[in-house]
Image (cartoon, rainbow, N blue to C red):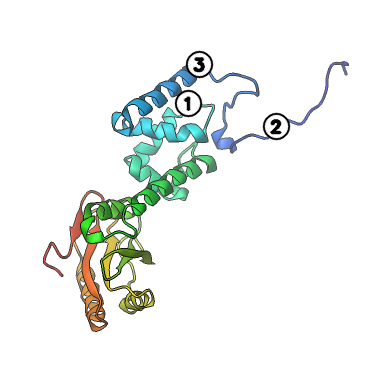
Amino acid sequence: MPAHSAFHEAPLPLFDADEAAGLPLPGVRLPSYIRDHRQRLRARFMQGGAAAMPDYELLELVLFRAIPRQDVKPLAHALLQRFGDFNRVLSAPAERLKEIKGAGDAVVQELKIVEAAAHRLARAKVMHRPVLSSWDQLLDYCRSAMAHRETEQFRVLYLDRKNVLIADEEQARGTVDHVPVYPREVIKRALEITASALILVHNHPSGDPTPSPQDIEITARICDAAETMGIVVHDHLIIGKTRDLSFRSEGLL
């Protein structure tokens, strides 16, 4: 063996194999066309904000952190082609995201961090504030949390005597077209936290917020139970993919 040869342990990859294909060797500079593209996108974002960028470019910005040494545009387009838009990509289940070639653990983690940050920001705008005077923010929060889910979820927003939101709790999860709801549990929890009023919220993964006969029936049962305990049900909101429905506005409550 030549005297100058030596064995050494190769460094571990930063990301999973499916995300690191073509990763440059240590010390090799990022190709200029990728580096320049990333710099331009970042500059445009800082100058014009998200409104100045189409969905695929905003998604690229998110993917930069997960895949630091590759062109992420093909992956951004593949994700959007599968799920439809930026919001649906963020809210897609991890298992479905991983079906896309190149979307490994690091990509999924980055997307879920952004999704969680968006939910927390929207939630902060409504928690511990008078709900009836910040209705638009409440709807934004519900849309952020529920509009793009693939299964039904039933949430209860609990309010105090001043209609300040004191708790936002998921009461049940279901299938694509059904979620089990137990009026007794809804009212029991209201009594535990001394809530004086409720807003019921659930989503329709089909996208159509038109209430089903079961939606109307369960709402009536919760209202009856709440009235017995002196608790007000302000509304039942159904969140669709592109529009929402209010039971009160529709004369159903």
The answer to whether one can see residue 217 in this image is yes
Measured Cα–Cα span from mark 2 to mark 3: 24 Å
Tell me residue 75's x, y (percent).
44, 33
Tell me residue 165's x, y (percent).
31, 63
Q: Is residue 32 above or below residue 105?
A: above
Dividing the image into 4 quarters, which one contains the N terminus?
A: top right
First-in-chain label (2 vs 3) = 2
Of all residues shown, which one is farthest toward the bottom?
228
Measured Cα–Cα span from mark 2 to mark 1: 22 Å
Element on which disc 3 rests: helix
Dividing the image into 4 quarters, which one contains the C terminus?
A: bottom left
Element on which disc 1 rests: loop
Label 3: which residue? 32
Q: Residues within 10 Å of mark 1 (few under 14, many from 20)?
A: some
Q: Which mark is residue 11?
A: 2
Element on which disc 2 rests: loop
Of all residues shown, which one is farthest toward the front?
162
Label 1: which residue? 71
Q: Residue at x 64, y 34 (%)?
A: 13
Q: Is residue 114 above or below residue 50?
A: below
